[in-house]
Amino acid sequence: MPSVSVFGAQWGDEGKGKMIDLLSRDADVVVRYQGGANAGHTVVVQGEKYVLHHIPSGILHDGKVNVIGNGVAVEPNKLLEEIEGLRERGTTIDPSRLQISARAHVIFEHHKLLDVLAETWKGEGRIGTTGRGIGPCYADKAARTGLRVCDLVNEEDCRKRLTAVLAEKNALLEKVHGAETLSLEDELEKALAFGRQLAPFVCDTAATVRRAYRDGKRVLFEAAQGVMLDLDHGTYPFVTSSSTGPDGIAAGAGFPVRHIERAIGIAKAYCTRVGEGPFPSEDHGAEGERIREAGHEYGATTGRPRRCGWFDGVAMRYALELSGADGWIVTNVDVLTGFDELKVAVAYEMDGKRFSDLPAELADLDGVSPVYESHPCWSEDITGIRVFEELPESTRSYVRWLEEVVRVPIEMLSVGPERDQVIPVPAL
Ligand code: IMP
């Protein structure tokens, strides 16, 4: 596994944290390349729960280099809290274990305020963002008005750039939104203090990653969110503001895509979504509620109840094909235990027409209804099983059926939150 991309293949919250933690055992370098504190990767180690927002899940293993790449939107106070929280629980965090790209863009207070204010203005059309300033930060990056981590560690640059930026942002806050303005001196002082604290970790991470690969080290690229929230290929405009699949690695980590040797998608055995936007297989009734309660489907970052529904085979085929996935991992299979039957969307229907693939002209999925097929469920507790052949016959045939629907092999199942609650799936 010299270089592998692990990404979410649905609308985020697929259980990537646990799987990346597990897969990072075989990696030397673990790299986050997009997103920011909008993500919350949950890992449970011996009953202890860790929620990571910026720092790659490899930090929970000794001897790994963890990289926050240039494509990540860094919220310094949150990142410092994360570092402190891990240290308090006995994790060593030093520059040999954590590196932060000098080129990563920084989330400021004005980004968070404008994120929330813009959502209020959108009314019915709101996206349901996490309010962490992600959209405004990436917008400034594209507009070339953002500040990067390297700007925080240089007082003169920071003052010059923040003075110019804040003049415009304060005008926006006051004149467009009727909100209070921010004090330049306060913001500058905070930014420089963050810069001083982060400075030991800051370097050219893209060079680190390429050098590691050149030296034969194993590199794991950890995505946040999911392909259906991808800025270009997801359900725009109800998406996040970065490239959430393997294609984001080149820009967000400075690593050539043609050197990525494996791509593995992560998906839950059902679907969830937070925020607004189309979700064809959403179940508004008792079954959706049952999935939410059984799967504890509440946001790791915002605590919001997640919208829940059945596995969407059409969206999944699209996400894996788009990402060139070699295989995928199904998480939360245990959550389905005890249902009368399991439904899977095998096609969509709209205006009497049936679509087996996500139609380009319907990329935003508005107005499509799912065409379901059903499979018998199992009632046995599967959380203690570690060998595929020991699973109930209906679980095994369900897994094989999912492979048929999606047409990409399943490599592993996850049947509980702990690291060891996984079952390798033999290739057919
Ligand atoms: P933003 O990334 O905060 O701008 O939010 C844009 C959309 O992406 C909203 O629908 C969010 O709920 C969703 N989103 C952002 N991060 C995550 C995540 O980590 N898991 C699931 N949904 C997310």
Image (spheres, helix red, strand yellow):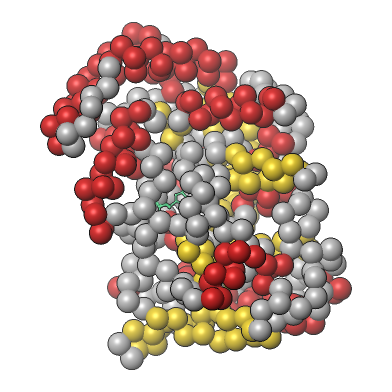
For residue 105, side relative to residue 415 (left or right) = left
Residue 82: where, in percent of width, then height? Answer: 59, 30
Residue name at image x 51 percent, y 63 percent: 272
Work out whether residue 43 or residue 181 is closer to the camera in this orientation and state it: 181
Please identify the quarter of the rendering in which residue 401 is found: bottom right
User: Taking 372 as reference, is 295 above or below it?
Assistant: above
Is residue 203 visible in this depiction of the protein? yes
User: Taking 388 as reference, is 125 above or below it?
Assistant: above
For residue 312, side relative to residue 17 (left or right) = left
Residue 348: where, in percent of width, then height? Answer: 42, 81
For residue 67, side relative to residue 386 (left or right) = left
Work out whether residue 109 or residue 315 is closer to the camera in this orientation and state it: 109
Residue 3: where, in percent of width, then height? Answer: 64, 46
Q: Quadrant of the C terminus?
A: bottom right
Is residue 205 visible in this depiction of the protein? no
For residue 291, side relative to residue 428 (left or right) = left
User: Taking 27 as reference, is 412 above or below it?
Assistant: below
Residue 46: where, in percent of width, then height? Answer: 80, 44
Please identify the quarter of the rendering in which residue 85 is found: top right
User: Taking 40 as reference, is 334 above or below it?
Assistant: below
